[in-house]
Structures are given as C-alpha cells and as structure tokens.
C-alpha cells in the first residue's frame, strides 16, 4: 500500500492550496488549477516511472506552529508528533514536502485517524508527504459530513500554503473515506484535487452491509427507543463518554460538563432529593488541581504502557454510537445514506473531476466495490473531457489490513 501511494502521489510544487481554496473567484480558481495540472502532468508521469531510493528514516520531532496544539500521543515509538489545528490532525514531513495528502478514514474509525491509521500515515510522512487527516463522526448524511470536512480542510489550507508554498493536494481515503472523497471531488467544484487514492471503496446501502449488524442490532435498538425505551439513556452514554475522554487526557471534566451530569442524573430523583442537589456545580481551583494531580499518574502509566492510544481510539469510536442511534431513530428504521448509492454513482459519472485516480482493493475484502467505481470513473463524463487517468491495483490482505 505504501509503495502504491508513493508511486501515485505527484511531487510537483505548482499547485497552491491557498490559490484554490481561498480564491474569491471559484470558476477562475478551478480553471487555473486545470491549466496548472495540464502543464505538470508530463513532469508527474516521468517522476512516477522513476524508482525512489528514499531511506526509511524516522521523522524528527516537529514543533507545533502557531494556532496548532500538540497531539503527540499517537502510539508512535518514533519522534513524530501530530498537531491539531482547525479540526485536523497534521503530521509534517521530516524532509522537503512534495504533496499534501488529505486523509479520511473509514466508518467509525475515521473519528481518530491519527491513531487508527497512524502507522501508514507516519510512514508516508517520512517520504515527504504533508499529512492532513480530518476526523469525522459517522452520519447517515454524507453531504453534511463532506461539507464539514471540506470546511475544516479549507481552514487549515492557507497556513500550510503560506508555510510550504504551492503543493499538489491528493485525497486518500479508506472505505467510507474513499466514498467521501468521491463525493467531494464530484459535488464540491471549488475543492479540486490533483488526484485521489481510493482504498477499499464501498458504496453499499445501509441494509446491504455498509453498517455491520444493522438488521440484527441497530434496528431492534431503534424499535426499542420508538416503543418508549429509555431514550435518555443515550444522553447518559454521551456524558459517560465525555468524562472518559477527559480522564484519558489526565484532566478533570470542566464545570459545564459536571453541571450537565448532575442535572441529568438528578432529574429522575424524587423532588425532595433533587431539590437538595446544587444547581451550579463549580470545583474550587485548589480542589481541581489536587484531583487532577491524583488522576494524572494513571494517564501517564497508561501512556507508558502503550495502552493510552488504544483507549482513546475506543472512546472516539464508541462516542459516535448514541448520536447514530438517535439519528436513525428520528428517520425511522428505513433510513439510508444521503445521497443513496445510486445517486452517488450518478454524481460521480457526471461530475467527478480528479485528473488522476488510483483505486486500491484487497483480495480478501468481501465488502469491497472497487471494480464498480473503477469502471464508473473510467467512463465518467469528467474523465472523458479532461483525459483523466484512472487505474486500479489489487493487494494482498482484507478490509482491515
């Protein structure tokens, strides 16, 4: 996979993210992008044919830039450090940057891409790729998810362009992330890409296997809620998840979260008891400092044992479940993705605009739909007009490889 992505991603520095994402004239920016890609395609083709004898060096520790916070506990044993800026996890290469890789992970695990895909992304970074991994919470409304992802990437793009200069932007997505990149490239005309790498593409409907256990687990849970089950239990799960995330950071919940918890759990109590519960909970600074000092060693021990990243990843994944159940409950058990699979295919056939696309599949992946998207993109109107290159490759492994 590393070799395939390295061989595909362009290294020309003509394409400025700031020029595309912050232009006041979207049409002009798109035309300028196409002209620049026409000029550089011959150079990129020549570079792809060359073997890259780059050493597998470990990246040096990066220093967070202004506006970014460190997120270095990524499970890496190297000196690499993730930064969190504008809702994105950013990993800077230890060598001159050759391209921006905008990464989107799969369903649920895409909420913590710097953890779930950390090994792959760190290795790509050592070969000169500036990684921008945008986390997202799974939703049945893919369009809203795409809009949120694009907005956060656009917020980060000007600072990166100002620091690194013009760089090509390549979308890399796994499973649901690959689907989201197809939608962005088809339906967001002011967000052009030099290319896309689509890994284990999946455009199945909800009931066709896109959501494992939908009929067996999700639908019964929805019916339970609709029949008068404890819908407030979802709120309780969310609050517990919020507390867990704070604890894993070695921090105490803020007073606002403590007040939510007290109010939630006091509500069902008898009035004589609930009336005695304070309406405004605020920990004195001295007490907060003492309690934080007590839980900090636990977080440090988990970090030293290498367990902390896994726990954080689990917390991010589980935290999405209550909102998903609530979303499906509001729409009924017949909810499907927006847009549904047939509409995704129609949009890609009509409007997909990436000049270069690499579709990667795994031999042991039962839910992969790479052959379908490969054929569709090769026959798309956009590919025909622009003379785009679409190619595929199959690797050994499975959907989780």
Image: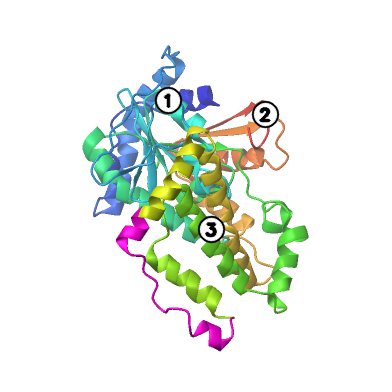
Q: Is residue 270 magenta?
A: yes
Q: Secondary structure at mark 2?
A: loop
Instruction: Determine if residue 401 is in view.
Output: yes
* Residue at 73% in and 72% down: 223
Residue 20 appears at what percent x and percent y?
30, 45
Label 1 crowd bin: few (<14), some (14–19), many (20+), radius 10 Å = few
Q: Position of residue 358 (x, y in %)?
A: 53, 33
Q: Is residue 379 magenta?
A: no
Q: Are marks 2 and 3 in contact (CB under 8 Å)?
A: no
Q: Is residue 299 left or right of residue 223?
A: left
* Label 1 SS: loop
* Lower position in the chain sequence, tag 2 or tag 3: 3
Residue 380 occupies quadrant: top right
Work out whether residue 363 or residue 123 is closer to the camera in this orientation and state it. 123
The residues colored magenta run 269-289
Nearer to us: label 2 or label 3: 3
Residue topped by disc 1: 78
> Circle 2 sits on which residue?
397
Residue designated by label 3: 241
């Amino acid at each position: 996979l590393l070799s395939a992505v390295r061989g595909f991603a362009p290294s020309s520095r003509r394409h400025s993210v700031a020029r595309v994402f912050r232009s006041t004239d979207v049409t002009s920016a798109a035309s300028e992008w196409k002209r620049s890609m026409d000029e550089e395609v011959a150079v990129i083709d020549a570079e792809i044919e060359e073997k890259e004898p780059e050493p597998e060096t470990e990246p040096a520790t990066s220093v967070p830039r202004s506006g970014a916070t460190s997120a270095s506990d990524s499970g890496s044993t190297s000196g690499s450090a993730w930064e969190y800026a504008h809702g994105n996890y950013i990993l800077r290469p230890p060598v001159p940057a050759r391209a921006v890789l905008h990464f989107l992970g799969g369903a649920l695990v895409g909420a913590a891409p710097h953890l779930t895909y950390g090994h792959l992304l760190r290795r790509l970074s050592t070969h000169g790729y500036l990684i921008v991994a945008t986390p997202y919470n799974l939703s049945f409304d893919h369009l809203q998810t795409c809009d949120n992802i694009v907005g956060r990437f656009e917020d980060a793009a000007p600072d990166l362009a100002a620091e690194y200069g013009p760089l090509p932007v390549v979308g890399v997505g796994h499973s649901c992330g690959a689907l989201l990149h197809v939608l962005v490239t088809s339906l967001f005309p002011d967000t052009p890409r030099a290319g896309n790498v689509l890994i284990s593409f999946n455009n199945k409907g909800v009931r066709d296997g896109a959501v494992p256990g939908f009929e067996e687990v999700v639908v019964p849970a929805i019916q339970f809620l609709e029949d008068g089950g404890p819908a407030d239990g979802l709120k309780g799960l969310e609050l517990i998840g919020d507390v867990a995330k704070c604890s894993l950071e070695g921090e105490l919940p803020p007073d606002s979260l403590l007040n939510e918890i007290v109010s939630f759990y006091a509500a069902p109590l008898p009035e004589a008891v609930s009336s005695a519960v304070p309406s405004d909970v605020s920990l004195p600074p001295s007490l907060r400092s003492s309690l934080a000092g007590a839980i900090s060693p636990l977080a440090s021990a988990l970090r030293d044992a290498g367990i902390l990243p896994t726990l954080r990843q689990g917390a991010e994944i589980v935290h999405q479940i209550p909102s998903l159940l609530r979303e499906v409950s509001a729409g009924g058990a017949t909810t499907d993705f927006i847009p549904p699979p047939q509409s995704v295919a129609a949009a890609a056939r009509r409007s997909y605009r990436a000049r270069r696309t690499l579709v990667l599949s795994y031999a042991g992946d039962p839910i992969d739909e790479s052959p379908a998207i490969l054929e569709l993109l090769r026959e798309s109107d956009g590919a025909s007009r622009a003379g785009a290159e679409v190619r595929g490759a199959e690797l050994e492994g499975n959907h989780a490889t």
